[in-house]
Amino acid sequence: MPSEKILAQKKATVAQLKETLGSAVTGVLVEYKGISVADDTKLRSDLRAAGVKYSVVKNTLLELAAKEAALEGLIPSLKGATALATSEADYTAAARILSKFAATSKTFRIKSGFLDGTVIDEAKLDSLAKLPSREVLLATVCNAFQAPIAAFARAVQAVADQSEQPAA
């Protein structure tokens, strides 16, 4: 039987994991075994730069947190060495960075994930990873809105230029 101190620490960890799962818009579970320290350091740096929280978690504690956060669909994936990557703002960052890393590694693999409180499979995570970043999507939308306005402005300028020319 674990001591009261250890039990309190585990309960605090489960509560923190539940909060992390609940506040994240997206999360990805990966099996991280077999990667070098240098690769792990680079991966963590890339994730941090994108605003993604990444941590190695005990499967039993994550299972309890997943139950409390109504993400029971993650439980079958909780086997082996597990790490959790979550993002509170960017829907694609974690999936994009981890998928890119998994493509170059023989042992690192994506297990499962969730999106807005719904568990998704590897195929949906792969689709999510292929989406451009939020900034690229916003720039594309802005360009789509700007194009008709710019064309209208050019047409008005052409009419104004024609009316200023003297009659021949």
Image (spheres, rainbow, N blue to C red):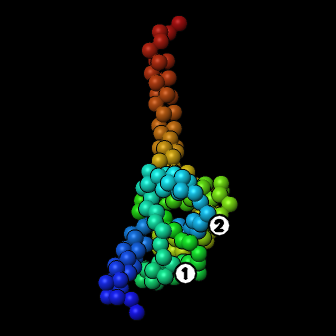
Report x, y in % for residue 149.
Answer: 47, 37
Report x, y in % for residue 155.
Answer: 50, 28
Tell me the element at label 2: helix
* Residue at the far right in the pictured view: 106
Badge 2 crowding class, 10 Å Cα cut-off, few under 14, some 14 to 19, many 20 or more, is few
Which residue: 49% across, 28% down?
A: 154
Name the image quarter holding the N terminus. Answer: bottom left
**Can residue 113 be seen in this snapshot?**
no
Which residue: 42% across, 67% down?
A: 24
Report x, y in % for residue 23.
Answer: 39, 69
Residue pointed to by mark 2? 123
**Can residue 98 be seen in this snapshot?**
yes
Residue pointed to by mark 1? 75
Looking at the rendered structure, the kind of residue marked 2 is Ala
68 vs 25, nearest the viewer: 68
Badge 1 crowding class, 10 Å Cα cut-off, few under 14, some 14 to 19, many 20 or more, is some
Tell me the element at label 1: helix
C-alpha distance separating marks 2 and 1: 18 Å
The disc, 2 or 1, on the residue closer to the chain's N-terminal end is 1
Measured along the vertical axis of the image, is residue 69 above or below residue 156? below
Measured along the vertical axis of the image, is residue 12 above or below residue 110? below
Which residue: 44% across, 51% down?
A: 49
Left or right, residue 36 beside residue 44: right
